[in-house]
Structures are given as structure tokens and as C-alpha cells.
């Protein structure tokens, strides 16, 4: 019998990313894409963050719309749990571009929707 009670090295706990505030049309499109792939929106976001950790395309800085002309972020996408090292890569890339984690996740969703057309 194997030593099933052996102490394992400490595993890094997954990190929960912030909830993504996004426009309703993009949220609906992302949920539909996730459903089409057989994933929940949470799993799809986690997979998207994992994919970003491999590809590492830089984020662009956020362009602010003039008052009354911008999209409203009326919808929410869930807050996924991802491995600590992948969350750190996302945070590093967001900081390098001067954007928040929420904006970085919005840009990831936007890229995903553009490439899935």
C-alpha cells in the first residue's frame, strides 16, 4: 500500500479575479459562445485567462468616451478562479498597459468575441 497519508507540498490556492462589468450585448454574446462550447461563463472566463497566460498579447490603454457617448457596463460576468501564476501574469500585463484587471478582462472578452466570428 502506498503512503496515502504523506504530506504533500503546499499547493498554490486559486485566485479569484474580479467580477467583470461589461456591456449587455457583449455579455450575452459571451454567454452564448460559452454555451455553444459546452462551458459555463465562469469556466469560459477561466479558460480565456489561461489562454492569455500562454499567448500574452499586450493590452491597449483604455480610451474613455465623452460624456453620454460611451457604452454602459450594465451587465456582469462571473468572477472566475484561476491558478495564482496565471492571475499574476494577467495582473502584470494589465499593470504594464496601465489598465485595471476589470478592463483587462473586458479586453480579453472582446478579443475572444472578435476571433470567434
Image (tube, rainbow, N blue to C red):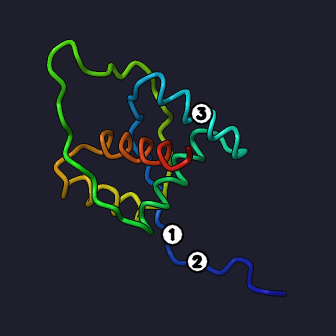
Residue wearing tag 2: 8
Q: Nearer the viewer, mark 3 or mark 2?
A: 3
Residue contact at pointers 1 and 3, CB within 8 angstroms: no
Identify the secondary structure beneath mark 2.
loop
Work out whether mark 1 precedes mark 3 in sequence or the reverse, and give the earlier one: 1
Q: Nearer the viewer, mark 1 or mark 2?
A: 1
Residue 40 to residue 22: above or below: below
Label 3 packing within 10 angstroms: few (<14), some (14-19), many (20+): some
Residue 23 to residue 48: above or below: above
How far is mark 1 from mark 2, CA to CA? Answer: 8 Å
- Across and down, in percent, residue 112 comes to 49, 47
Residue wearing tag 3: 31
How far is mark 3 from mark 2, CA to CA? Answer: 37 Å
Label placed on residue 11: 1
Residue contact at pointers 1 and 2, CB within 8 angstroms: yes
- Across and down, in percent, residue 83 comes to 48, 61
Amino acid at each position: 500500500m502506498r503512503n496515502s497519508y504523506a504530506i504533500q507540498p503546499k499547493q498554490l490556492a486559486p485566485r479569484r479575479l474580479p467580477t467583470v462589468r461589461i456591456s449587455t450585448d457583449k455579455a450575452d454574446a459571451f454567454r452564448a459562445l460559452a454555451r455553444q462550447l459546452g462551458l459555463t461563463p465562469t469556466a469560459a472566463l477561466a479558460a480565456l485567462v489561461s489562454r492569455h497566460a500562454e499567448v500574452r498579447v499586450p493590452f491597449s490603454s483604455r480610451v474613455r468616451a465623452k460624456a453620454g457617448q460611451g457604452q454602459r457596463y450594465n451587465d456582469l460576468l462571473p468572477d472566475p478562479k484561476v491558478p495564482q501564476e496565471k492571475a499574476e501574469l494577467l495582473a502584470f500585463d494589465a499593470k504594464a498597459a496601465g489598465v485595471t484587471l476589470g478592463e483587462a478582462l473586458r479586453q480579453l472578452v472582446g478579443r475572444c468575441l472578435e476571433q470567434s466570428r
